[in-house]
Image (cartoon, rainbow, N blue to C red):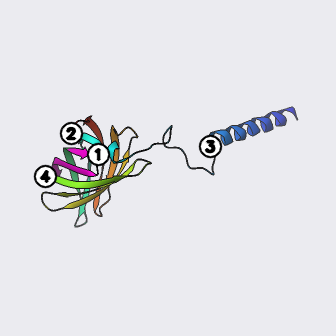
Amino acid sequence: MHLRYVKTMSLGLLFAMGGLLYDAGQPPQVWSKDPDCTLDTLKGTYIFAPQGFQVQDGQSLPIAIAGTENYDGKGHVEGQLTQSINGEISRVTYRGTYTITPDCVSTETITDSTGATSHYDQFVSPDGKEFTFIQTDPGISLSGSERRVSKQR
């Protein structure tokens, strides 16, 4: 009988502690404090090197990219990159726009020098020093991260 009491107490303590550590009614906090991102959170020069695949005619063609882009802190972005799609190399420049929510979730739309338009979802650190992204266009599986190398523009 004493052992059952210890198990019951232990389980009760675990559930109580679990309730303190996790409240199923509330979404988990992403940041240690409430972020307050604005367009100005993304400002400066960032470097990136994502990898992924482009699906074309039922085949997955590998993509590798390296480049830099500049955010103006007002919703505009421009950049340059070199890309390899299935071993074919091309160099492009691009311009676009971005938005960002107070929760540091950003969207970006760019049009490159070939006329192609691309869309991205981005998840930004509250200080704007880095973010992760994924391309959201059909037939493309491309993701990566960016790091700010200069806040000057």
Q: Predominant secondary structure in magenta? A: strand
**Which residue is at the far bottom?**
57
Of the two numbered discs 3 and 2 on the same chain, state the one appearing first in sequence: 3
Displayed quadrant of residue 41: top left
Amino acid type of disc 1?
Answer: Gly
Callouts 1 and 4 close, C-beta under 8 Å = no
Amino acid type of disc 4?
Answer: Val
Q: Residue at x 74, y 36 (%)?
A: 13
The part of the chain drawn in magenta is 69-90
Q: CA distance from mark 1 to mark 4?
A: 23 Å
Amino acid type of disc 2?
Answer: Arg
Looking at the rendered structure, which numbered label has been put on residue 22? Answer: 3
Q: Residue at x 26, y 48 (%)?
A: 51
- Count how many numbered circles sit on residues in the image: 4
Q: Nearer the viewer, residue 25 or 5?
A: 25
| Residue picked out by circle 1 | 73
| Residue picked out by circle 2 | 153
| Residue picked out by circle 4 | 92
Callouts 3 and 1 close, C-beta under 8 Å = no
User: Label 4: few (<14), some or many (≥20) within 10 Å?
Assistant: few
Displayed quadrant of residue 35: top left
Callouts 1 and 2 close, C-beta under 8 Å = yes
Q: CA distance from mark 2 to mark 4?
A: 21 Å
Residue 39's x, y, as percent? Answer: 33, 48
